[in-house]
Amino acid sequence: MKKTLFTLAFLTTLMVAAQSTWKSDGAHSKVGFAITHLMISEVEGHFSEFDITATATDTFDDAEFSVDIKTVSIDTDNDRRDDHLRSPDFFDAEKYPSITFKSNRFEKTGDKTFKLTGDLTMHGVTKTVSLEGKVNGIITDQRSQKLKAGLKLTGTINRLEFGVGGDTASLGDDVEMTINLEMSQQ
């Protein structure tokens, strides 16, 4: 029995030791979204200020993610629309300055794919959401000699469930999220 407990403790220590912190590279990452407008076209945008941290192995198995997106940084290439999206009619950026996501479940779905489930908080509302993930590749950076990983996270959320914008025929309810990440091991 003692030998079994020792082996379990040793293996747990190895698994924890194999985890490291990864940070998103803002110059090579993008938090994007798309929403239907007037039921005939799609408007795309992104958030330019965000911090994404992961705790993961060198191969990004069993990763945990923490995301903080600044709502004031929304950019749809239209200043008037962006100001409206920052207003109390939508994100209310002054009252709710951040959108956060904290994963609590990682499920490997393929050799380079995974499903990430966690709590998304937006506009003061927290809901459980799932994102599909893909590891595009992992390399050793020649300058830093540390690992870098390319990842893509995608998912769909219903903006009305978070109280963002009203029920209107001019906007779709579903928002497609696409997060392209280049992460550096710390």
Image: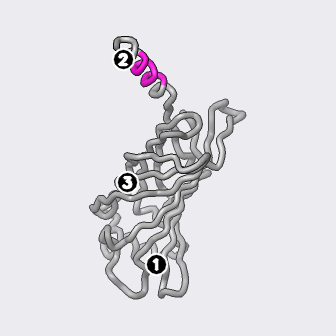
The quadrant where residue 59 appears: top right
Q: Amino acid at mark 2?
A: Leu
Q: Earlier in the sequence, mark 1 or mark 2?
A: 2
Q: Which residue is mark 1?
A: 80
Disc sitting over residue 49 in the figure:
none
Q: Position of residue 57 (x, y in %)?
A: 53, 34
Camera-side residue of 2 and 167: 2
Instruction: Kindly report which numbered mark, 1 or 3, lies closer to the viewer in this rendering.
Output: 3
Q: Amino acid at mark 3?
A: Thr
Q: Residues within 10 Å of mark 3 (few under 14, many from 20)?
A: some
Q: Which residue is mark 2?
A: 5
* Quarter of the figure with the C terminus: top right
Q: Which residues are magenta?
A: 7-14
| The furthest residue to the front | 1
Disc 1 from disc 3: Cα separation: 25 Å
The quadrant where residue 128 appears: bottom left
Instruction: Kindly report which numbered mark, 2 or 3, lies closer to the viewer in this rendering.
Output: 2
Q: Please name the residue shown 37% across and 71% down the image.
A: 159
Vertical comparison of 9 with 41: above or below: above
